[in-house]
Image (tube, rainbow, N blue to C red):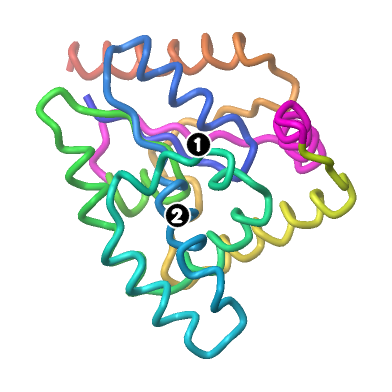
Amino acid sequence: MIIAVDGPAASGKGTLATGLARHYGLPHLDTGLLYRAVGLAAAETVDRPEFEAAAIAAAQALDATQLTDLDALTAAETGVLASKVAVIAQVRTALFDFQRDFALQPRGAVLDGRDIGTKICPDADVKLFIQADSKARMERRARQLEARGVAVDRYALFHQIEERDARDMLNPNGGFYKARDAHLLDTTQMSIEAALRAAIEIVDRVMALKAGG
């Protein structure tokens, strides 16, 4: 069983994907970490002419050992870098096989990101699109950062989230939109526990319908 979980930053998709993977006993990949790792690797060249070439080289050389420093990878500024490398077609091509190979494990997998249901796994058994309003997402991300002792400028963070949404949606090489057959789940007013219960209900219902068909 392949479960695709898409949505914007801090919508809750990563937490829900982790919970779904635990519930169904499936491996989980946060595909956003791939782009964040590439962005970090090319950070010294950002806003310079060689940035694109550096990002492509980083994507082609990426391996799982670069996905372990979660403090650096989940920083707000790293998210901005991720959205900048994600618009580069060759970066997306270099990371495509990594994601597909993970998804096509014999047991299946849960993947979360921005284009899992549209580009990476258009044939996923279940597709979820998670959304929440920008203010709620900003506050969630701020609390995550503050829990790690990071000082947060909420005004700046709100605008980073809004800018990243716009950049991702306008990405000509991306697929950041709700797939036609994806199930929408708005988590703005939901606790983590309630959102996970709702996601599990969706997955169970879809799989039951497929089994009955």
Helix, strand or loop at mark 1: strand
Mark 2, residue position: 37
Q: Residues within 10 Å of mark 1 (few under 14, many from 20)?
A: many
Helix, strand or loop at mark 2: helix
**Quadrant of the rendering where the C terminus is positioned:** top left
> Which residue is painted at 47% across and 48% down in the image?
114
* Viewer-closest of 14 and 200: 14
Q: Is residue 147 left or right of residue 153?
A: left
Q: Is residue 106 above or below residue 150?
A: above
Q: Is residue 200 left or right of residue 169?
A: left
* Viewer-closest of 40 and 184: 40
First along the sequence among labels 2 and 1: 2
Q: What percent of the width, then of the height, locates residue 194?
A: 61, 10
* Viewer-closest of 116 and 19: 19
In the displayed orientation, state which residue is furthest to the bottom: 49
Please provide the residue range marked out in magenta: 122-149
Res 4 quadrant in image = top left
Mark 2 or mark 1, whichever is nearer to me: 2
> Which residue is painted at 35% across and 74% down in the image?
56
**Quadrant of the rendering where the N terminus is positioned:** top left
Q: Is residue 40 above or below residue 54?
A: above
Residue type for callout 1: Phe
Q: What percent of the width, then of the height, locates residue 198?
A: 53, 13
> Which residue is painted at 22% across and 19% down in the image?
210
Q: Is residue 5 left or right of residue 24?
A: right
Q: Residues within 10 Å of mark 2 (few under 14, many from 20)?
A: many
Is 38 one of the magenta-colored residues? no
Res 9 quadrant in image = top right
Mark 1, residue position: 129
Q: What percent of the width, then of the height, locates residue 62?
A: 30, 57
Residue type for callout 2: Ala
